[in-house]
Amino acid sequence: MSTSLTIPRLEMSMTEGTLAEWVVASGGAVKQGDVIYILETDKTARDIEAPAAGMLIHKVEAGETYEVGTEIGEIV
């Protein structure tokens, strides 16, 4: 079973965010609670933690801006 990773809504008015950096490489092992990427908005930058344990798979590149809800990766 895999866990989908999407751009979260960090603020009520947020419509998009920039995936500033993947902290864990694609194919890397993660534990629940590990920081896996950094998300930037027009107001803040935030460390985003893994919601589950497993192997992280990137589906998008860092440095790009994505709409809230866009699938950016998964944990398998």
Image (spheres, rainbow, N blue to C red):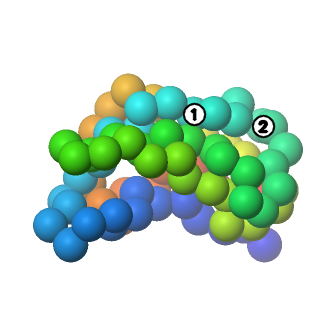
Q: Give the camera-side residue of 18 and 69.
A: 18
Q: How many marks?
A: 2
Q: Quadrant of residue 31?
A: bottom right
63 left or right of 16 in image: right
Amino acid type of the residue tagged 2 in the rendering: Gly
Badge 2 marks a residue whose secondary structure is loop
Closer mark to the observer between disc 1 and disc 2: 1
Whether residue 59 is visible, yes or no, is: no
Residue depicted at 19% across the width and 43% down the height: 42
Report the disc number at residue 35.
none
Depth order, front residue of 44/38: 44
- Relative to residue 66, is residue 76 drawn left or right? right
Quarter assignment of residue 13: bottom left
| Residue beneath the point at 63% across and 33% down | 23
- Taking depth in this image into account, of 3 and 8 the one nearest to the observer is 8
Residue type highlighted by circle 1: Trp
Q: Dot 1 corresponds to which residue? A: 22
Q: Nearer the viewer, residue 57 or 15?
A: 15
**Residue 54: % across, % down:** 83, 56
Residue bearing the label numbered 2: 27
